[in-house]
Image (spheres, coloured by chain):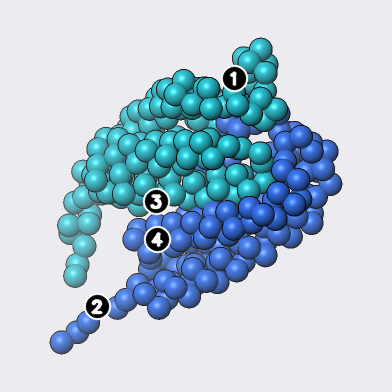
Amino acid sequence: MNWKKFFFAFIAAFIFLFVFGFLWYATLMHDAHREVPTLLRPEADLKSYFGWLALGQFVMAFFFTLLCTRYVPGGRAGAGAMLGLLVGLVYAGPHLISFAVQPLTFKILCGWIAGAVIQFTIAGAIVGAIYKPAAEQIMNVKERPR
Amino acid sequence: MKRFILAFIAAYIFLFVWGWLFNGVLLKDVYAETPNLWRSQSEMASLFHWIIIGQALVVFSFVMIYASGFAGGGISAGIRLGLLLEIAAIGMRLGFYALQPIPGKLILYGSIGGVIEMIIVGAMVGAIYKPASPRTS
């Protein structure tokens, strides 16, 4: 594992997930979310829970980056984006289940699914573009007997 | 392809039964503490197909990720993939906890259940799916 590149990829993924989350879910979908006020904490309470949101994004970015480095050990934006797309679909599944059990609107469901797919596809491309294995690892792979 | 379908079906059946046992039976009383957050039983029944589609999407995408990046690693690779995906999903759950008035214990129990679920799904997929061996002339 190239920890230096991993660290940069993780920070970039974290920043992207955070900014995208704010733009997509809190800004673009703000009005759609306000259609179901009982499902959301009051705006005044949100500040006191902000730490949980940040911690959640941190955990998500760290383990997503780790997954990318295992899945695409050589790095590459395209392969990272492909993994991100599949991860986005894995997380879109629970949104469909939430729609069946929580009084969400169809507009919110579509927004959440589109958000998850776009967010993880781009995050995967970012991690794939930044993460590269250490030179000695590449040498080891090349020198391995066939 | 045959192995892919078998892995998908086995993992899907497990996920369906586990989801019902864990959420519908074990955590029933915890969900009942916050009725304003959930649809009525009759509404849920009419939207049940969304649960089936959602679970199928989770399993299909999981097997796709395993088949394209982890295949050949066996059970341990499947478990590793399940754990990585689930711990990242715990991050997502924390985000939902910050935004929705969901009780903390539901997040905790859901995360524990999720880890167990994805370890078993990963083990099943890893045990069943095997990459096609290269053809020799």
Q: CA distance from mark 4 to mark 2?
A: 19 Å
Query: Residue flagged by tag 3: what amino acid is it?
Result: Leu
| Chain A: drawing colour | cyan
**Quadrant assignment, res A128:** top left
Do callouts 1 and 3 mark residues in contact (Cβ within 8 Å)?
no
Is residue B60 visible from the viewing direction of this image? Answer: yes
Q: CA distance from mark 4 to mark 1?
A: 34 Å
Which chain is home to disc 3?
A
Q: CA distance from mark 1 to mark 3?
A: 28 Å
Q: Secondary structure at mark 3?
A: helix
Mark 1, residue position: A50
Along the viewing direction, whichever of A79 and B51 lies nearer the viewer: B51
Q: Earlier in the sequence, mark 1 or mark 3?
A: 1
Is residue B118 visible from the viewing direction of this image? Answer: no
**Quadrant assignment, res A122:** top left
Is B120 on the left or on the right of A144, as rendered?
right
The percent position of residue B9, horizontal first and vertical second, equals: 52, 71
In the drawing, what numbered circle is on residue B64?
A: 4
What is the quadrant of the N terminus of chain A in the image?
A: top left
Q: Determine if marks 1 and 3 fall on one subunit.
A: yes
Q: Secondary structure at mark 4?
A: helix
Mark 3, residue position: A86
Is A13 on the left or on the right of B41, as rendered?
left
